[in-house]
Amino acid sequence: MYDIKWKNDLKMYLHTFTSFVFEGNINDLQPVKGEREEYRYLPLHEAIAELYGEEYSVVFYDHTKLSGLAIPEENSRENENDPQPAPVLDEKWFNSFIFAERSLTVLDSSTGERIPSPNIALFLEYYRDEYLRKKDESTNKGFQADITKDMQRIYDAMADFEKKSAQPEYKDAKPYLFILPDVSRYMTRPGDPTEKENAILLVLFKAIQLVGTRCKLMLFVDKMNDLPTWFESENNNSAIKKIFLPSPDGKFRETFYRLEMSSVMEPVDEKNLDKLIKKFSAYTENFSLRRLQQLRTFIVEESPHQESGAPSYRNLQNIDKTIFRFEVGQSYDPWRDPSLRTTIRELSASLNEIVKGQRVPVARVSEVMKSAATGVTSSKKNDRRPRAIFFFAGPTGVGKTELSKQLAEKIFQNQDSIIRFDMSEFQQDHTESRLFGAPPGYVGYEAGGELTKAIKQKPFSVVLFDEIEKASPRIWDKFLQILGDGRLTDGKGETVSFTQSIIIFTSNLGITSLYRDDKNKQKALEEVDASISATLTALKTCSDEDKTELVKKLVEQERSRAAITGLTVDLAGRDLFTKYSDEYGMLNDTMYVMPTDAFNAFVENCVRDRIENYFEQIGRREVLGRIDKSNILVFNFISPNVADEIAMKAIRDYCENLRTENESRLNLSVTDAALEFIKEHTKTAETLNFGGRGVVTCVEKLVGSKVGEFIFEHSEIGLSATLDCVDGALEVRLG
């Protein structure tokens, strides 16, 4: 037997409080015991209706069906003296309001027979009266499709019940129990409603405070702080009882096995049964009840079609392999491929060959991959989180995306094993449904989410979220589930697993300006420049004892300036740090460091500060708890030496493509003078601001125009040519 705390809480407080707010595991199925002691598993709103359908007239509200209300027109009568057609119970009458099945009839107190519920007539009478009032108004004919108006209808229906329930014809009427399953969806910014959304909540608040009502309101929210503080505060709304629904715990999962799974599994020796059931519970940790049901269905349907010699899905001893097949959809596991260890041993060296100048991030990624390959991702047994989670930050064009691509190809041995999302396409709140799938009733529900569909197709992959800071903050609510539990349930109720994937976020936070408004930006710059000037003046005349504190102050002032301007405005910051180091000494804690190290440390501190501030601002600081801080990797600016390496590689690749891929099959050699000319032009501040991408673009621009002109004038195939620098300009000549 299940021990369901929320049911006990509801039973205890149902007649004490007017309203209830449910949060937590609200979208999961709930067990309801039938008359024959068997269990049925129902959505939360249906479970409540099943439990209290005899005591209350349960009405569900679906805000996706805002289509107004249809009442037969008076001219539908054959004779004008005929009475107005009586309303008939039909879905179109109620639109957003749906009576639960058990609420459609009641027990007649005089005859003992079941009759149509008086609440139906009461509800329709109220609506008909409202309709007749509205239809003659020139400015507002009929009903408007508006959530605010529907909230008012809930309030009015509750008040109408209190007024009319004493009348003889309504003696068998039951109090209304209105269930609103997705209140969080009423607001574009949960916790911070707009003026219109506040109006919706104000009407609900008024209904909750309805004095003397026997009717009840039940609100389901994703989390309590989706409601504004004024609404759910104990001081403001003592009529509300908060009820939290936890996910199935270990005891629940063990009970589920005994009640539901044991009948479809192979017999187990009694002396080993308890141990194996605990194994089942461990491997289904964080499974919802809906997910447990899906697992049972999978075992029943897939067992007859297993490959010959494969471990039996019905054998409890193999539950780890069964769940792997259930979640991933394939039996091959790249993480267990014997060649993977060799790949990871060589990973650091191979990545450094491609991603230039980022030895620290590459080293950390390689280190984490060793743990990921062994499945040792935390001290927690049977950790179901993604294999690895990284946050790549730093300037544009320095290798964040390239490192992600190379990691996917080397770990999963397939260059297509990367799923990339440009988060600048998901800036609006409503784009959440595009990524994760729309809830039932919303546009796009049948299509599902782009992310959930992609991970179903490629469970072994690097999932890359580019420029994550541009995404709507609401999206992070779903990311928290992925990062913490390794799975996500889409709008269709289907759960996808991220346990075999690598999650990577990239960001330019700390590199670009804090200010979008030029006026405010200029004012802030003037203030910080004045403070820097004052500190520099003081440094020139200060004693050695005061130098340390003043240098620290200067660093903090420069960090402020960098946040205002954005470090990518130009690379004067590098020269500035060199100057400070030469003249005053740059400090890292208590030790003097080299200028380059000082600048890189400065950039990293700026970036880390901005990342932390970003999650503070969007109210999602818990994300930092899901990402190991050592896996927040700040990439360096491209140095002149690294720019030379990138330029040389770009030239080699360009020449190779000319020889093999271009129709002319041109054999191009490059003189030392040309190489030096190219390298000198790729090391300008303007070019380096765009990182390695800027260097490659510069090479292609410098060489491409000259080579293109040469090929245009020489149509022969297979010619040999030389790229040289003559009188400060590049030229291509035969031979």
Image (cartoon, grey):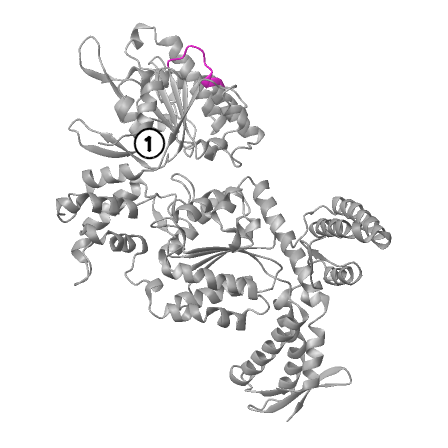
What stretch of residues is rendered in magenta? 206-214
Which of the 4 quarters of the picture holds residue 615?
top right
The x and y percentages for residue 571 are 72, 62
Q: Residue at x 57, y 49 (%)?
A: 470
Magenta stretch: residue 207 in it? yes
Judge whether residue 632 can be spotted in this image: yes
Magenta stretch: residue 663 in it? no
Seen as rendered, the residue at the extreme front is 545
The x and y percentages for residue 397 are 60, 64
Vertical side of 607 occupied by 92: above or below:
above
Task: Label 1: state its secondary structure.
Answer: helix
Q: Residue at x 18, y 15 (%)?
A: 113
Seen as rendered, the residue at the extreme bottom is 735
Residue kind at label 1, given as amino acid type: Leu
Horizontal arrangement in the rendering, residue 333 relative to residue 526 (left or right) = left
Q: Looking at the rendering, in which quadrant would you find the C terminus?
A: bottom right
Give 278 or 13, whichever is nearer the viewer.
Answer: 278
Q: Residue at x 54, y 51 (%)?
A: 468
Which of the 4 quarters of the picture holds residue 603?
bottom right
Judge whether residue 78 can be spotted in this image: no
Vertical side of 441 occupied by 537: above or below:
below
The x and y percentages for residue 304 are 16, 55
**Residue linked to disc 1:** 44
